[in-house]
Image (cartoon, coloured by chain):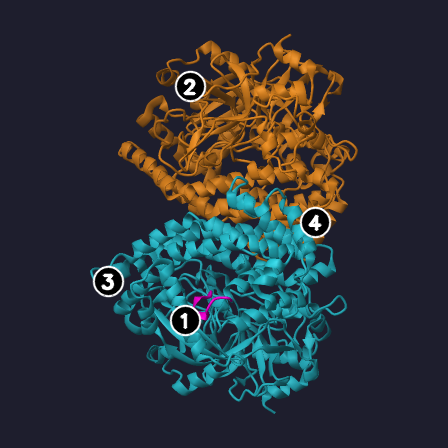
Chain colours: A cyan, B orange
Amino acid sequence: MTTSFRARKATAWLAGSALIAIAPAAQAEEGMWTFDAFPTEKVQGEYGWAPDQQWLDRTRAAAVRLTGGCSASFVSPEGLILTNHHCVVRCLQDLSTQDSDLVANGVNARQRSEERTCPGQQAEVVTDITDYTGDITSAIAGKAGAALVSARDARISEIEASECPDRETTRCQVVTLFGGGQYKLYKYRKYSDVRIAWAPEFKAAFFGGDPDNFNFPRYAMDAAFLRAYEDGKPVDTPAHLKWNPRAPQDGEITFVVGNPGSTQRGMTGAQRAYQREVALPNRLLQLAEYRGRLIEAMRGSEERTREGGSRLFGVENSYKALYGRMQALNNAEFAAQLDASEAELKERSAGTLEGDPWGDIAGAVSAYRNFDEAYGQIDSSGGSQLYSYARTLVRAAKEREKPNAEREPRFSDAHLPLTEKRLLDAKPTYPWLEELSLRFWLSKTREIMTTDNPDVQALLGKESPEAMAERLVSGTGLADPETRKALWEGGLAAVEASDDPLIKLALSQDARSHELTEQFEEEYEAPVTAAQAKLTDARFAAYGDSIYPDATFTLRISYGRVTGWEENGVQVPFSTQMGGTYDRATGSDPYELAEAFKANKDKINADATYDFVTTNDIIGGNSGSPVLDKEGAVIGAAFDGNIHSLGGNYGYDGNLNRTVVVSTEAIQQALEVLYPAPELVAELAGD
Amino acid sequence: MTTSFRARKATAWLAGSALIAIAPAAQAEEGMWTFDAFPTEKVQGEYGWAPDQQWLDRTRAAAVRLTGGCSASFVSPEGLILTNHHCVVRCLQDLSTQDSDLVANGVNARQRSEERTCPGQQAEVVTDITDYTGDITSAIAGKAGAALVSARDARISEIEASECPDRETTRCQVVTLFGGGQYKLYKYRKYSDVRIAWAPEFKAAFFGGDPDNFNFPRYAMDAAFLRAYEDGKPVDTPAHLKWNPRAPQDGEITFVVGNPGSTQRGMTGAQRAYQREVALPNRLLQLAEYRGRLIEAMRGSEERTREGGSRLFGVENSYKALYGRMQALNNAEFAAQLDASEAELKERSAGTLEGDPWGDIAGAVSAYRNFDEAYGQIDSSGGSQLYSYARTLVRAAKEREKPNAEREPRFSDAHLPLTEKRLLDAKPTYPWLEELSLRFWLSKTREIMTTDNPDVQALLGKESPEAMAERLVSGTGLADPETRKALWEGGLAAVEASDDPLIKLALSQDARSHELTEQFEEEYEAPVTAAQAKLTDARFAAYGDSIYPDATFTLRISYGRVTGWEENGVQVPFSTQMGGTYDRATGSDPYELAEAFKANKDKINADATYDFVTTNDIIGGNSGSPVLDKEGAVIGAAFDGNIHSLGGNYGYDGNLNRTVVVSTEAIQQALEVLYPAPELVAELAGD
C-alpha cells in the first residue's frame, strides 16, 4: 500500500484506439530510451535532425533524480533545481506549522539563508553506466527460485559496494532492465541536502485539483525550485541546462529527460489478466475507501487539511492513474492489440526459445494468486509512517548483523545511507492520520482474509482494529527521531528490549513477513525473471535494437513534438494561456483563484502560454522532468498526462497520448509578476 | 445508487468450480421455481418424494413479501410474521430516539398495544397468478425502441388497474419473466400497516458483523417478528405455517419460499463483459469511497452511529455481494462455463432463430456504454432521501396529469398507493447523512464526467459540491411529511411555485433525467427485451420445461438439502451451536457478546443448533424466507449465503453454494431464555 501513496505522477498511458505498439519495434515517438541506446537514426529519419553525442552528454549531466520519486534538472551553475510543485508538496507540508502554511502560501526565499532543507530528500545525477549483464548472469547460472534471487542480490551488493567506496557523495545502483534481460551499474553523484527555494501557492500550482488531474486543458503552475547544498553551501553545477522562457511552437521537436518509474509493457497475457482481474480492482477499492475516510476525517479542520493534504493528493493521484490502467486493460480493442503483439513475438521466436517462458510466467502468476492477499496485507506498514519506521528498525537490526552480500538490498552497504537518512531525518507525523491509516489497514486485513485466518488472528489477537490502532499510536515513541536513532544504533539488543508497541508488533510480524517475501521470490520473482530474460533475447532477435526496456526509475530520454489531438472529432489545442485561468475560475475550490492571480490580473501577460502538450512517451516518476528543445534549452517541466495516456503502462498510442507541461514562459511570469523573485530571474538568465 | 443501499441480502452465488448450470437444463437443486411450474417429477426422482399441490398451495398462501426488499411468512393465525432482523433494522432505527435505541436494545412488545408501525413497510401475499403473455405480446407487436416500451407499459397499467379495482387491500403487478419471454399478472392481498413485535439486540442479530457477513460459520440471531394489522387490529391469517422449533437433520430435504430479487443467469456474454469491465467495478468503487466517508463521519458519535447504522449496513452488504459477483465473473473457469452454456444454446438453436438476438444485445450494450455514466450519475438521487422525495414529487406532479396508461409504471393507478405511502409516511432523516450523501454524489459526478461536461455544468453551476450540498440540506423543508403532503396534493402548480432548493434542483434536472431514461429505453431496454424474448423461445425449444426464469422479486420456491461442503480439502460442518458464540467472542466489536448472551450463559441450551446451511438456490430478496421441511413446517429463516454463493447471480454450483439459515430451535431459545416472550411462544405453539 505504501508505494501507492507516494506522490508520483503517473503520466503516460492510454485508453484504447488504433496505433498501439508494445513489444515489437517501437512506433514513431514511442519509447523511454536509455542514454546509451538513443535511436539517433530513427529520429534523424523522422525529423531530419537528431541530437549528437555532445548534446546527449550535456543533457544527461544536468538531469537530476529526486529520491522521493520525481525527476528534475539543474538550471543554474549554483545548484538550482527545477521540478514540479507536487514533487515538493510533502516537503512544504513537513516544514509547515500552524502559523506558517507553506503549502497554502508557497515559498519565496529572498536569500540563501532562507532556503530550508527538505526532510528525507536526496538529489542524484548519473555519472556513469556500465554493463554487468555477463557478470550477473554467470553468478545466477544454474540457480532457480529463492537461491537465484539470493545469488543475484549478493552479487549486486558486492558490485555496488566495491564500485562506490565513497558513500558520502556517490551511490551505486545495479539496475535490472528488460525484466532480467540486462543488468547495468548506474553510478550517481548524490546530494543529500536539498533545500526549497521557491514554490507558488497551492491554489496556483494545483488549480483544478483532482477533477482536472489527468485531464486537459490545464491551468496549473506545477513548478518549484530546489537547491542542492553540500557543507552548508550551494553546490557548483557547471553542467546545467539553459533556461529559455519562451512559448512552445506547434510541431516543434521536444525531449523529455527524466526517470519514468515503472511500465509493464513486457508483461505477458497472464500477468495482464492478473492485473485486470485482481491487482488493479483490489488496489483501487482500498484506495477508494481510504480516500473516503481521509476526506471525511479532514473535513472542517484547517489543521488536518494541511497535515493530510499531501497524503490525500497521493491517494487521489494513484487512484486516478490506476483507474485509467484498469480501463485500458478492460478496453477490448486495446487488449486485443496487446495480445496480437504477444502472438507475433511467439510466432517469430517459435523453435528458437528454450523451454516455455510464457507458460513459466503463467505458472508463477497462478502460484502468486494463492498468497497475494497475505503478501499484500501482512507484509505491509498499513500506510503508517510510524509503523514503517518500526518495521525498518526491526528488519535492519537483523539484517545489519549479516555480511553485506547476504543482506536485503535496501540494507546493503550501498543503500544503507539512504535508508538511514529516510529513517532518521526529522519530519512530522500526525497521530490522527497514523491512527486512521492503521485502523483502516487492520480492518481491511480482517475483511479480506477473514476472521478465521491464522495470520489475521496472529495480527489482531482479541483486539478490534480500532482499539489496536489507538493503542499503538498513543503508546509509541517513534515520532521522535532521537528514539529512532537510539534504536538504530542500539541494534538488535535495543530493539528486542524495547517495549514500544509498534516495535513489538513489528517484531511479532517480522518472521511471517519475511516468509511471505521468500515465498514471493521463490514462486514468482525468480521464475518470472528467468522467463523474462528469455523473452528479452527473443525480442532482440526479432526486432534488433529498435526496442527499449520497461521503465525502472532510471534516467531515460524520450522524443516527441508539440501538438494537440483529436477528441470525438474535435481538435484539442496544444496549449492554454495564462489569461484563461480567470475564465475557468468559479470562486469555489478547486477552481478558486490564488491570491497572486487575483491581485495581478492586470499585470500578467494573459497571452503567455501556460500549459501545453507533447507526444513524448513518459510515465509516473517523470514528474518534474525538463522538457527540452532542439537547442537543449528548457522550455517547460512535465507534470501530467492527459486522460488517454493512462494506458501507457502497457502500451503507447501517439494519436492520443499526451504529456502535459508547464511552460517556462509561465514560470517566468510567476517569477516576475506573481511571486516576484528577481534574484532567481537573474540566476536563470545567467546574469 | 439508491437501490444498492437497500438492505437486501444478496444470498446465493458462486466463485468458481465444477458444476455450474445456467441457461441449459437446471442441475440438481438448482432453480428458483415459480409455483405454477414446480419440477415435481425431478424432485420425486432425486428424493423419492415431492410436495403435492395441496402442500404447495398451503405454503404459497402463507408466504409474505415485504416491499422493503425482503421475504417473510405468516406463522400464526393472528398475523404474526417471521422475517430477518436485518429486514427490520431500518424500521427499528426509524422508531428510535436519543433515549431509546431499538437497534441496540431490540424490541419485546409485551402486549399488542406496544407493537409499533414500521414507516413505509407493506406486506403482500400472492392470491392469484394469470398468464398475459399473448395479450402483451400482441400489444407490442411490430413496435420497437421507446414505442415498444410505452406500448408495453400502457397495456400493463391497464391490466393492473382493471384487475385490482380495490386498491385499499389488493395490488396487481404484471411481471416480466425470462427477460421478456413471458408476462404474468400477480395479484396480491396487501397489508399496509405492519408493526414490530419482537427483535433481539443488534449484537445478537449481527454478531460477527461485516467480517462474518457472507462467511460461515455464523453465530447470528438474524430473526424478528412483525405483525400485520388492518383497521387497528391484527389480521386473521388462517393460512399460516406451522412453527417447529427443532434442529435440522443432516441431509434432510428443505424448501425455501420467498422473493429472490434479481438474478442475471440469462445474460449474454456481451452483457456479462459489461458487468465485469464497467458496471461492477464502478459501482464497487463508489460504494467503497462512500463507505469510507460514512465510517469516518460516524466515528466517535453514538448518535450518528445509530442514525447511520442501517445505511452503513446496506452499503457494506451491497459491497460484499457485488465484490463476490465481480470475483465470479473474473474467475476464468466460471466464465468459461457460462460461455460454454451460451455456445450450446447457439448451436442448438442454429437455423431456427429469427435474426441475431445475441448480436442485437451486443449492439445495445455498445450503445449503452456511450451514456451509462450520465444515466448513472444524472438520473440519480445521490443516496439522499430528501432529494429522492423531491424527485418523486416533481415527476409525480407531471405524470399524474396524464391518463393512467401513459404514466410511468410507478405512477400508474395500481402502483400509486405504494409510491404515495413511501413518500408520505413519517420517518426521520438526518441532515449530516443527507449532506454527506449529496456532497459525495456531486463530487463523484464531477470527477467521473469531468468539469467540462455540460451535464456537470448544468448540475453544479459555479458552486462546489460541498457548498451546494450544505445549501440544499439546510434550506429544504422536505423532512416534514406535512410539507411533502402539501406538495403532493398541490400538484404541478404547487411544485413549480415552491422555492424549496431540492424541489428547484429536481425541477431543473427533470427534463435531462427523463431524456436519459428515454434513451435507455430506446437504445437498451427495448432491443434487449425483444432479443431476450427470442432467446427464451430458443431455451424452451432446446430444454423444455426444465428451465426457470431469472429472479424478479416475485414468489419462488427452491428445494435443496441440509449439508455442509468441502473447503480446501476440509469438510465444513452444516451447523453451529449456540454455545459456540462464547468461544468466538473477543470482547471487541463486532465480536462482543450481547447483554442477553452475557447474562444467560448458564441458561441457554449450548447444544441447540444456531445457524445452518442448505443447498437451496436463493439470492438477495430471499432474506427472511421461511425454510420448510417435508411436513411444510418452518425450521428456520434464511438470512445469508456463504462466500461461494456470491456468483449465483450468474450461475449455480451445488457443490459449494450454500444458503445460511437461523434455526427455529435458536429462535425458540431466544424467545424462551434470552428475550423472554411467553405470549409469542404460546402463539407460535398454537396454544
Q: Chain of mark 2?
A: B
Question: Label 2: few (<14), some or many (≥20) within 10 Å?
Answer: few
Q: Which chain's residue wears label 3? A: A
Label 4 environment density (alpha carbons within 10 Å; few <14, some 14–19, many ≥20): many
- Residue ID for mark 1: A156
Q: What amino acid does circle 3 point to? A: Arg
- SS at mark 4? helix
Task: Tell me if I can see residue A454 in this picture.
Answer: yes
Which of A15 and B8 lies nearest the eye of the viewer?
Answer: B8
User: Furthest residue to the right?
Assistant: B99
Residue sitting at the far bottom:
A687
Closest to the camera, between mark 3 and mark 2, is: 3
Q: Which mark is residue B469?
A: 4
Tell me which segment is drawn in magenta.
Answer: A401-408
Identify which amino acid the numbered label 1 is placed on: Ile
Q: What is the chain letter for disc 1?
A: A
Residue position for label 3: A348
Q: CA distance from mark 2 to mark 4?
A: 50 Å
Quadrant including the N terminus of chain B:
top right
Q: Are marks 1 and 2 on the same chain?
A: no
Q: Answer whether residue B193 is visible to the viewer in this image.
A: no
In this view, the mark in front (4 or 3): 3
